[in-house]
Amino acid sequence: MLNKRLGIVGSGQLCSFLCMAAKKLKISTTVFTDDKDGPAQNFCDYFIYGKYNDKEKIREFIENTDIATYEFENIPVEFLKLIEKEKPVLPNPDINKIAQNRKLEKTFVNKLGIKTTDWAYIKSAEDIKKNQNLLPGILKSNTLGYDGKGQFVLNSLDDVKKDWCFTADYILEKKVNLKKEISVVITRFKDGTLSFYEPIENEHRNQILFKSKIPANISKKIYEQAISNAKKISEELNYIGVLTLEYFITEKDELLVNELAPRFHNSGHLTIDAFNISQFQKHVLSVMDLGSKPIGKISNAEMYNILGSEILDYRKKTFKKNEFFYDYLKKEPREGRKMGHITILKD
Ligand code: ADP
Ligand code: MG
């Protein structure tokens, strides 16, 4: 018997996996999305398509939800606040405000004494000139970026286009010589219990995650620092749910926070098969206050994203016993779009 209802805003693959995890825990799911093709409609119990300002649809969502959560950070905070008036929304939407704004995010992290790349807030070409010390750098839109969208590499001032009119605001980050990237997926429960997976090593291609693996090939010192930063940040935010920290490790072995995602993460997909309990189940347990369950590792693993038309070949393949293929069931295999993933369990 399904007894409690989890409302989820968003309908992409993360939402689909969350629906599957909820089902395992006998929780039913209501999805609200502004994407009528959202693949999570194949996995949820109740699907609502509407705009973020559609009062009737919002009402329908609230009435079919006991506790609400969301799939990604770029959801209008006002919308989440509206839901919060009647039903709990976790993680707290105010955290979302920080995570969807690079300036607020980096300021918050730096205030805790945790390092990020050197950066500056940019509103004009003049601001870039003033911060030349950050070149070569990456200009990133302050809000609404993902998978490298809204980013420009600036090797020198010559790369600043004359016709840029700076209608949006940006941050300029110094380009780091990366040795490695890792992420930490941590869960915090209402009673303050923390539960985390070992750090995951990530490889990006064209700014999109290409591969994740455990164990991460990192020193004990970096391992411990990555976990302790994650604990500190989730405690400071009084966080409830799954939180992911993306880190850079520089060539000089410095650990820098790249960004925080107030949610389960692409790099954590390998937790579905490599652990007794996935990041999605952890999130459901935490936001529905069902108690933490100890994490047990089943195996080392590698996960590869399947982008665009690559999915067509995968759909025809047969897989070995240690290979787990997931098709997100998206309609159009657009170039660079995440269409599925495969996790390979290793000794
Ligand atoms: P998104 O919000 O699109 O995920 P990120 O800021 O995480 O944006 O950037 C995506 C990827 O681009 C990173 O994982 C990293 O591989 C690369 N990248 C981003 N910023 C820097 C930087 N300052 N120096 C070097 N590489 C970077
Ligand atoms: Mg990122």
Image: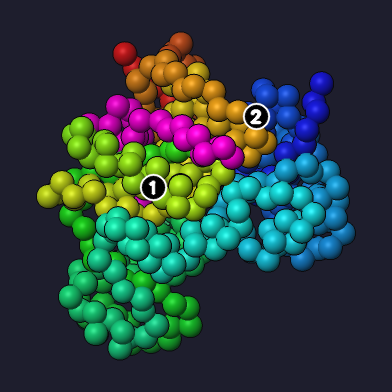
Residue sitting nearer the eye, 306 or 116: 116
* Residue 225 visible to an observer of this rendering: yes
Residue labelled with disc 1 = 232
Image point 40% across, 62% down: which residue?
108
Q: Secondary structure at mark 1?
A: helix
Image point 39% across, 47% down: which residue?
232
Query: Against 4, is 277 above or below?
Result: above
Q: Position of residue 155 (x, y in %)?
A: 21, 71
Q: Is residue 201 left or right of residue 51?
A: left
Residue type at mark 1 is Lys
Q: Magenta stretch: give its range.
A: 188-217
Image point 19% across, 45% down: which residue?
179
Image point 23% across, 62% down: which residue?
175
Residue labelled with disc 2 = 290
Residue type at mark 2 is Leu
Q: Quadrant of the C terminus?
A: top left
Q: Position of residue 263 (x, y in %)?
A: 53, 45
The residues bearing labels 1 and 2 have C-alpha atoms spaced at a distance of 23 Å
Query: Against 274, is 139 above or below?
Result: below
Task: Check if residue 192 falls in the magenta segment.
Answer: yes
